[in-house]
Image (tube, rainbow, N blue to C red):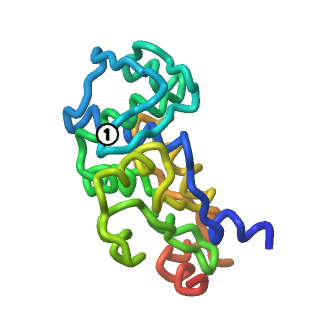
Amino acid sequence: RQRQMCIRDRYAPGSIFKMVTAIAGLETGATNTTEKIRDTGTFYKYNSSWHCWQRGGHGWLNITGAIEKSCNFFFYTIGTRMDIDVLAKYAKYFGLGVKTGVELPSEVAGSVASRETAEKNSHSWQPGDMMSAVIGQSYNAFTPLQMAKYVAMIANRGKNLDVTIVKSIINPDGSEVSRDEYESYVN
């Protein structure tokens, strides 16, 4: 059971997801590297309020400081400038909510917060739902292996990485078994 947890169980990623939000914000122009946002501790929007984990706030932060301090307020702010489906596109680029293709049976995809995911859960996406999504909550639920791949991609400057436990299989005659052939046995 424990070895299957990495491909079958799904968890809300929480603050590690903030890097997806940061990248999406930078790439779409929702923020930039020099903009500073003042975290007062409580974010007001859509007739509601959301709190930063640091109740008194972090003060003025740029995106680097927001990642460093894991500042919810900063990500709430840039989240109001983005569409949820744009954020979902960036999450999927990093392999979140998508099967990795690892050579193990019964891998699950997980889910990425989006309009489509909300509708599958009999909910219509509301603007305030973005507040949970940008900090790794809401419908975001990923396998530990997906999260490891995502972090590895960040460390490798966004380069897509194949997740594999089998580099190759060699027949007794020295020829290599094709990937398609050995994947047909796993799936």
Q: Residue at x 27, y 57 (%)?
A: 85
Q: Residue at x 54, y 57 (%)?
A: 146
Element under disc 1: strand
The foreground one among 104 and 116 is 116
> Does 180 appear above or below 97?
below
| Quarter of the C terminus within the rendering | bottom right
> Does 164 appear above or below 43?
below
The percent coordinates of residue 99 (x first, y second) are 49, 68
The foreground one among 181 and 103 is 103
The percent coordinates of residue 175 (x first, y second) are 56, 74
The foreground one among 76 and 29 is 76
| Quarter of the N terminus within the rendering | bottom right
Horizontal placement of 15 versus 25: left or right? right
Q: Residue at x 47, y 51 (%)?
A: 161
Q: Residue at x 31, y 39 (%)?
A: 45
Horizontal placement of 127 versus 94: left or right? left
Q: Amino acid at mark 1?
A: Lys
The percent coordinates of residue 3 (x first, y second) are 76, 67
Rendered image quadrant of residue 106: bottom right
Residue projecting furthest to the front: 47
The percent coordinates of residue 153 (x first, y second) are 47, 43
Give the crowd class for mark 1: few <14, some 14-19, many >=20 residues within 10 Å.
Answer: some
Rendered image quadrant of residue 114: bottom left
Residue projecting furthest to the right: 2
Number of callouts in the render? 1
> Does 80 appear above or below 8?
above
> Does 163 appear above or below 18?
below
Q: Which residue is labeled 1 in the image? A: 45
